[in-house]
Image (spheres, rainbow, N blue to C red):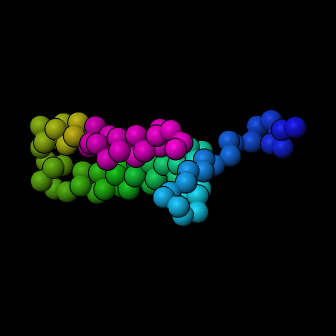
Amino acid sequence: MNSRAPYSPPLPACKARSGREPHISVMTIRTRKFIGTITLLMLVVVWSLLGMTVAQTPWLANSGWLQAIFYVVAGIGWVLPAVPIISWMARPDA
């Protein structure tokens, strides 16, 4: 008989390591996605606050070309730190 509820996450994988007690993986994909989502939200909030702070500087506010370049870089720039977080979140359970 199945002891799990119909929508419960899978049981952690156990692997024996060279004679020692088995390793139990406590970081399931569900946990990684939760932590990654919180991390991505914090990244976006901090990135946008820093972007607004830099956008208010006089040397940037006085130049239309610099503003255009800055907003393109700031708008796309958050993706680079987000890629490793998203790839970590999508990693399958061991």
Residue 7 on image: x %, y %:
76, 37
Residue 46 on image: x %, y %:
38, 56
Magenta span covers which residues?
74-94
Residue 79 on image: x %, y %:
32, 40
Q: Left or right: 68 with respect to 85? A: left
Near-viewer residue (24 or 61): 24
Q: Left or right: 42 with respect to 16? A: left
Does residue 90 show up magenta in the picture?
yes
Tally of marks: 0
Residue at point 50% right, 57% down?
17
Residue at point 68% right, 46% down?
11
Residue at point 29% right, 51% down?
51
Q: Please identify the dominant SS of the magenta region.
A: helix
Near-viewer residue (85 or 49): 85
Which residue is outermost to the bottom? 20
Residue at point 87% right, 37% down?
1
Q: Left or right: 57 with respect to 94? A: left
As drawn, 15 above or below 73 = below
Which residue is outermost to the right? 1
As drawn, 1 above or below 31 = above
Does residue 52 show up magenta in the picture?
no
Near-viewer residue (17 or 8): 17
Residue 49 on image: x %, y %:
36, 55
